[in-house]
Amino acid sequence: MTGIPWLPVSGGILATIIILAVFVVWRTYRELKSGFPLQDEMTMRIQGKAAMSTYYITLFFMVGEQLLLIFKNEAFPLLPDFDVGYLLIAVMLVQGISFGLLSWFYARAMGSSEDED
């Protein structure tokens, strides 16, 4: 991860954050103006359950990464080291993908149990 032109990358990250912030504010304003609630109770419950499960999955994944690093350093010290940037990217991917999948799974499971009653 060396040799990256950090000034353009930092500018791109800043532009992305600003664009996302403007989109979120615009969407929130539009939903408030329409009179519809931003989230209902079921959506908040699904997202809360998915967020808590994602927290535990990410925590266990990071503990697993640390155990892998300790095992590598103690048992196989001659192997090349892992780059920290790639480990952080892996954590972010696990967190994002698990939240998306769990939100979808809980929405489907809670929606189907409501329909069967």
Image: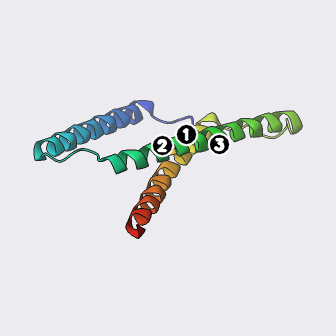
Horizontal side of residue 17 vs 23, given as left or right: right
Label 2 is placed on what type of residue? Ala
Q: Which residue is mark 3?
A: 61
- Identify the residue at image location x=86%, y=39%: 76
Secondary element at tag 1: helix
Q: CA distance from mark 1 to mark 3?
A: 10 Å
- Identify the residue at image location x=42%, y=69%: 116
Front position in the image: 56 or 115 = 115
Across and down, in percent, residue 53 comes to 54, 45
Q: CA distance from mark 1 to mark 2?
A: 6 Å
Q: Which residue is mark 2?
A: 51
Secondary element at tag 3: helix
- Identify the residue at image location x=25%, y=40%: 24
Q: Which residue is mark 1?
A: 55
Label 1 is placed on what type of residue? Tyr
Secondary element at tag 2: helix
Across and down, in percent, residue 75 comes to 88, 38
Camera-near label (2 vs 3) is 2
- Res 63 quadrant in image: top right
Label 3 is placed on what type of residue? Phe
Instruction: Check if mark 1's residue and mark 2's residue have beta carbons within 8 Å.
Output: yes
Front position in the image: 20 or 54 = 54
Mark positioned earlier in the residue sequence (2 or 3): 2
